[in-house]
Amino acid sequence: MASSSTAQDVSRCDLCKTAIAQSYCDFCHVNICKPCIGEHISDDYKKHIIVPILQRKSTLIYPECVIHNNKACKHRCTECDIFVCSFCTASKQHRGHEFLQLEELFNTKKHNIQNDADELESQIMPAYEDIAIDLEKQIASLDDQYKKLTTEMSKQREEIHREIDIVINQMEKEIDEIKVKHQSILHKHLDEIKQLQASTQQSLLSLREMEESNEISSTIQYSSKNEKFGMIPPKLKIIMPKFIPKQIQRERLRDVFGEVTSLSTKMEDKEYTSKKPNTSVRELLDEPKVLNRIKAGQKKLRRVACLNEDQIWTSGETADIKCFNIQGVLQNTIKTKSGYLPYDIDVDRDGALLYCDGVIKTVYKVKNDQTEEIIKLQGWTPVNLCVTSSSDLLVTMFSDDNTQSKVVRYSGSSVKQTIQFDDEGQPLYSRRTIWIKYITENRNLDICVSDYGAGAVVVVNQAGKLRFRYTGHTSPSKNQPFKPRSITTDSQSRILTADCNNHCIYILEENGQFLRYIDNCDLKSPMCLYIDNNEYLFVCEDERSTMKQIKYVK
């Protein structure tokens, strides 16, 4: 409170420039002393909003209605996705539509902005700083390390005297070249880190400015970049060359003297998990509600994947993978290489599309209309996939003889991990008999698989160790066998899985405890689920060509 009073004491009137300002105009954003208030509001007293200076920027500035003059828009129509005034809400155009209060949206975005700024400042930027310091230390120690290397070589040179001098000079030249390359790699990586630091700093400054802003339109349009910035690059660790001495034989002097190993570069992954304060917990709505119904132009929708409402990828029982926006306008169409339906689709953080072309045992990546083959299997068929928080790819697959199923983690086209058996050597997943095995990575890095054939959700940790199996929840209204189809997770590490037999969606907490159903949104055999960056749930249903956007969290 003392600091606020001090700030008021030093604030001068923006009109007369001399008197201390006791008030503030929330419309014009100027400090005003009491004598100047009358002059300031004389042009149009209705539009000016005079508040005590300690309450400056406390009045929300609503956008004006484009249809009704001098009316402020205080709601957003969820059906039309536009701001509306009180006259608009009562009009025939919006009859029966659902409206959201802009003040609530504004406050939610403000809260997210503050959390993002705090996260950038307290977690992400220090991580970049740590990498930069480590690189600078490596650069600073290069001379000492390479001096030690040449000293070891000199000791060997003393033993074979003048005959080896020519070879020594040649190999020292090689070391100098390696050192230059070493420095170049470190400087290049340091420059990249410095650029990322600058970007996060600029983002933080922008967020701080937005925290002070009371402009609704720009604030609501804010989209967080923290997930992108939160992808902390791995630390660069370069293995120093080694000098390996050999027994002296004059006829093979070069080979006998030894060799300098080549420069080896190793990237150490730095795990980063976004740590949101408790105040950002998204609680479940008492009554989930359908916000939109999107016509996807597919007779039988089977898959959906999206990052936001501008690009929603869908697929059905044809070779077409179609991209729509939230209004249902077709943006793009991709055809599978085989000409058959894709077994599964997903999108990465850059918005690139990935799909399983199971008929030809291949996983493709499509970006800017360019298709790239990233995984080609033999003896196994890829079925379902998901992109992880570290940009790895998790793929479920079954063997050609239909006797085995497994999960494989890929980095690019390289296998990093295979998950198939528990600690007792028993299969974690059912065989191909009914081969649907949707997969997703939870926020706690658990790997969750909906095993339709086993009637279970199988969850293992990051290392592939079994954590639990969930086999359903007893309920008089859900009397059909539990057969999970699609599976997804949200920002609170809750697990959502579709049960088409019981026409509902199960919500579990991260340790497998049942929380509740979603069964009120006219669901009919839900087949596929996907949660976008705004925490909206997209649902595809069997035999329906319309996809639903559902709000299920507060």
Image (spheres, rainbow, N blue to C red):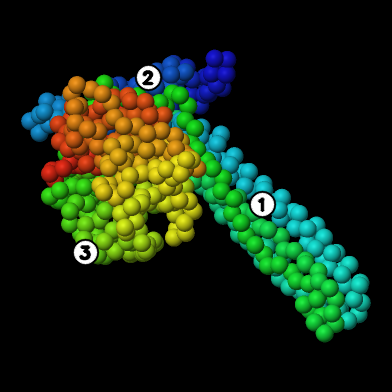
Mark 3 or mark 2: which comes first in sequence? 2
Q: What is the C-alpha distance between the residues marked 2 and 1? A: 53 Å
Mark 3 or mark 1: which comes first in sequence? 1
- Disc assigned to residue 334: none
Q: Amino acid at mark 1?
A: Leu
> Of 373 and 46, which appears nearest the observer?
373
- Residue, disc 1: 135
Q: Residue at x 88, y 72 (%)?
A: 157
Q: Amino acid at mark 3?
A: Gly
Q: Residue at x 12, y 25 (%)?
A: 90
Q: Amino acid at mark 2?
A: Ile
Q: Residue at x 84, y 64 (%)?
A: 152
User: Where is residue 326, by image quadrant?
Assistant: top left
Q: Report if the CB atoms under discs 3 and 2 are less than 8 Å apart.
A: no
Depth check, mark 3 against mark 1: the one in front is 3
Q: Residue 416's x, y, as percent?
A: 49, 53
- Residue, disc 3: 339
- Residue, disc 2: 50
User: Where is residue 5, by image quadrant?
Assistant: top right
- Toward the left, the furthest residue is 92
Relative to 411, does residue 168 appear above or below in the rendering? below
